[in-house]
Image (cartoon, rainbow, N blue to C red):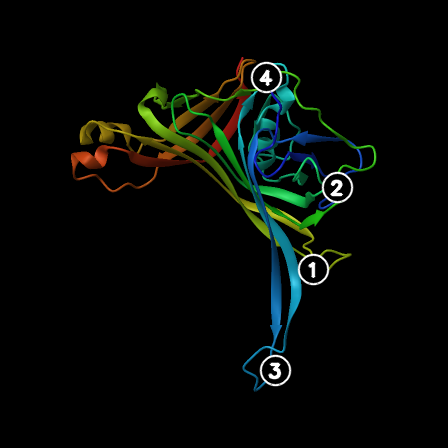
Amino acid sequence: MSELRAGYDVVECVYIEEPTFGTTPTSGTWKPIALVTNFDPRPRTIYKEKIGVGRQLPSKYVRVKRYAEFTINHELLAKETSPEYEWTQIWYYIITNAAYGSTFSLGKRLKTLSIGAKLDLSTDEYWLLKGCMLNRYEIASGGVDQVVTGTIEGVAQLADFSETDYVTGTATRQANPSSDYIKHGDCEITIAGNDIYDSINSWSFVIERTIERKGKNASDGTLYRTFVPTRCDISLRINRDFDSTTELNQFLNDTEFTAVLKIPSESGGRQITLSGGKWQELSSPHREIDLIDLTLTARFTGLSVETIS
């Protein structure tokens, strides 16, 4: 039996949806982010300097705002008997504030989370991030037969390190799977109806949100009142070899296209459809050697997600 253990520096990394911004629930279930390999919280403080007329050095620095940024690296998990561990359970929080389901599409608003991490099995050391909003999620792989990984980036209203467990009240932790887990491997990528997965060296799919920090918290003026997503960018990057400039030019054209990314699992998996695609500007290679290991990036205007039947 395999243990779902979260990475090198944390033995647990879990999250729970907040009822209101920055409020950690005392009921409900904390869900795991599967197979975490890195947890990196970064508290930030904004200071205002006080400097008088005729002075060259500030007389003091006053803390006016604080927040946190964080990065979580993990491997995508496919589990036939435990779909609640599916990677889209956390990924969809950068997509929409609608209810989670078998299908969902891009939305303008996002929900916030509390994210907790336990550092060691033998000691009581915990990180609790409150008011978390995801602003970047990258899904990537080195190509055929390589594990698919995820990189989560976000902002938090507050990051707190303590010896107090973040699971309080009647809230519970979701139990680990009782049987072997499966890491995602081979996927499918089609562009304009053509399957290209076997011909690429590596790929990455990124959703990135611009998050604005707004207002002053009523009980603590150094905290922000809320976070607001204002812009979204969707991109797909592939790295592949081309035999000739003619082949490259046939692949790259000004026609708008749809790309489909399928990440299967034993129980089906997910299909992500990216619409309104355009290849970004690329300097035309002048030598044959420049056609090897070439990285191309496309950006899209729409996204939808559905279950693979």
Q: Closer to the N terminus: mark 3 or mark 2?
A: 2
Mark whose residue sits in front, 2 or 4: 4
Dot 3 amino acid type: Gly
Q: Do tag 4 and tag 1 residues touch (Cβ < 8 Å)? A: no
Dot 2 amino acid type: Thr
Question: In the image, residue 239 lies at what x, y percent?
Answer: 33, 32
Which image quadrant for residue 108?
top right
Q: CA distance from mark 1 to mark 2?
A: 19 Å
Question: In the image, residue 224 lies at what x, y percent?
Answer: 67, 54
Q: Closer to the N terminus: mark 2 or mark 4?
A: 2
Q: Closer to the N terminus: mark 4 or mark 1?
A: 4
Left or right: 170 with respect to 190?
right
Q: CA distance from mark 3 to mark 4?
A: 65 Å
Q: Closer to the N terminus: mark 3 or mark 4?
A: 3
Q: Residues within 10 Å of mark 4 (few under 14, many from 20)?
A: few
Residue lying at the far left of the rendered structure: 287
Q: Which residue is label 1 attached to?
A: 222
Q: Secondary structure at mark 1?
A: loop
Q: Secondary structure at mark 2?
A: loop
Q: Do tag 3 and tag 1 residues touch (Cβ < 8 Å)? A: no
Q: Which residue is label 4 attached to?
A: 180
Q: CA distance from mark 4 to mark 1?
A: 45 Å
Residue at left 45%, top 29%? 274
Q: Which residue is label 2 attached to?
A: 24
Q: Which residue is label 3 attached to?
A: 52
Dot 4 amino acid type: Asp
